[in-house]
Image (spheres, rainbow, N blue to C red):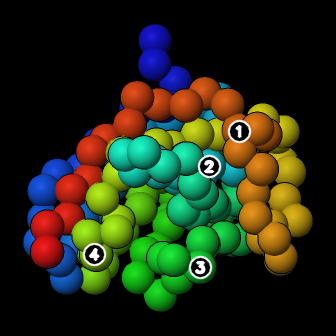
Amino acid sequence: QAQMVESGGGLVQAGESLRLTCTASSRFRYQSIGWFRQAPGKEREDVAVISWTGRQTYYADSVKGRFGISRDNAKNLVYLQMDTLKPDDTAIYYCAAERERTYSGPYFTAGRPNQSNFDWWGQGTQVTVSS
């Protein structure tokens, strides 16, 4: 049984919006969940992370002010609202859970999340933004 399933990707024009949904197993209720993306020919990069409480968030500089991450623990869902999309946002988007439970990573204050601390990666959903 898949632990994380991403959905909501698609083809949009620059300036439009999409909302991605990560359906997570209930076992991740006490773990931070992150969204990451990988564009063709590039390394996978972090996009946004939300703490297990939902009270702390992290955003990569490239998406600050345009993307919003949220979670509904009652439904085991994590959302990524993406507004004002740009062609550079074109990538496969993945969600994953941070390994340690009830952990508040230092990246919520400064720095970036370490992808090696995240497990249970989904299959990804394709986002394509045309110019």
Q: Height in image: 74 above or below 59?
A: above
Quadrant containing the C terminus is: bottom left
Counting residues from the N terminus, which is met first, the one under dot 2 or under dot 1? 2
The residue carrying mark 4 is: 85
Q: CA distance from mark 4 to mark 3?
A: 14 Å
- Tell me, yes or no, whether the two marked residues, 1 and 4, touch with CB atoms within 8 Å: no
Asked if one can make out residue 107 in the rendered structure from this viewpoint, the answer is yes
**Which amino acid lies under the numbered mark 1 shown in the image of this protein?**
Phe
Q: Are marks 2 and 1 in contact (CB under 8 Å)?
A: no
Q: Amino acid at mark 4?
A: Leu
State which tag comes first along the sequence, 1 or 4.
Answer: 4
Q: Residue at x 26, y 53 (%)?
A: 127
Q: Residue furthest bottom?
A: 65
Question: Sequence order check: which comes first, mark 2 or mark 4?
Answer: 2
Mark 4 crowdedness (10 Å alpha carbons): few <14, some 14-19, many ≥20: many
Percent x, y of residue 37: 47, 51
Q: Is residue 115 left or right of residue 93?
A: right
* Residue placed most toward the observer, 49 or 90: 90
Instruction: Tell me the kind of residue under disc 3.
Output: Asp
Q: Nearer the viewer, mark 1 or mark 4?
A: 4
How far apart marks 3 and 1 lie (CA) works out to 20 Å
Residue occupying the point 26% across, 70% down: 87
* Number of other residues with Cα within 10 Å of mark 1, as a class: few under 14, some 14 to 19, many 20 or more: some
Q: Which residue is disc 2 drawn over? A: 33
- Secondary structure of the residue carrying tag 2 is strand
Q: Secondary structure at mark 3?
A: loop
Residue at coordinates 31% horizontally, 41% vertically from top-left? 125
Label 3 and label 2: CA atoms lie apart by 18 Å
Q: Which mark is residue 118?
A: 1
As rendered, which of 74 and 97 lies closer to the eye? 97
